[in-house]
Amino acid sequence: MNPCELTVSITAMANAIACNRSADEINLLGVAFTQLGDTLLTIATQKSICCKTDT
């Protein structure tokens, strides 16, 4: 999947998730997904640092 296809897919998912939800529900989902993304980045960074070999 190229970057343009990825962003279009993410936009479509956001629109589908937001459909028929209140502003409060959309805000809560947004911050929850942001936290999920931040946590995944933290885990990936820690793994890349801890798994480096000293060569």
Image (cartoon, rainbow, N blue to C red):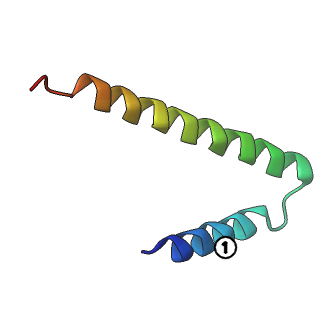
Indicate whether 8 appears above or below 33.
below
The structure residue drawn at horizontal position 31% and vertical position 30%, both measured from the top left corner, is 47
The structure residue drawn at horizontal position 52% and vertical position 32%, both measured from the top left corner, is 39
Image quarter hosting the N terminus: bottom left
Dividing the picture into quarters, in which one does residue 49 lie?
A: top left
For mark 1, what is the residue? 12
Image quarter hosting the C terminus: top left
Indicate whether 41 appears above or below 20.
above
Residue 45 x/y as whole percent: 39, 31
Residue furthest to the front in view is 55
The structure residue drawn at horizontal position 56% and vertical position 35%, both measured from the top left corner, is 38
Residue 41 x/y as whole percent: 47, 37
Local crowd size for mark 1, using a 10 Å CA cut-off: few (<14), some (14–19), many (≥20): few
User: Which one is in front, 12 or 51?
Assistant: 51
Residue 48 x/y as whole percent: 30, 32
Residue 25 x/y as whole percent: 83, 48
User: Which one is in front, 19 or 54?
Assistant: 54
The structure residue drawn at horizontal position 73% and vertical position 47%, both measured from the top left corner, is 29
Badge 1 element:
helix
Q: Is residue 38 left or right of residue 34?
A: left
User: Which one is in front, 51 or 35?
Assistant: 51
**Amino acid tagged 1:** Ala
Q: Is residue 36 left or right of residue 47?
A: right
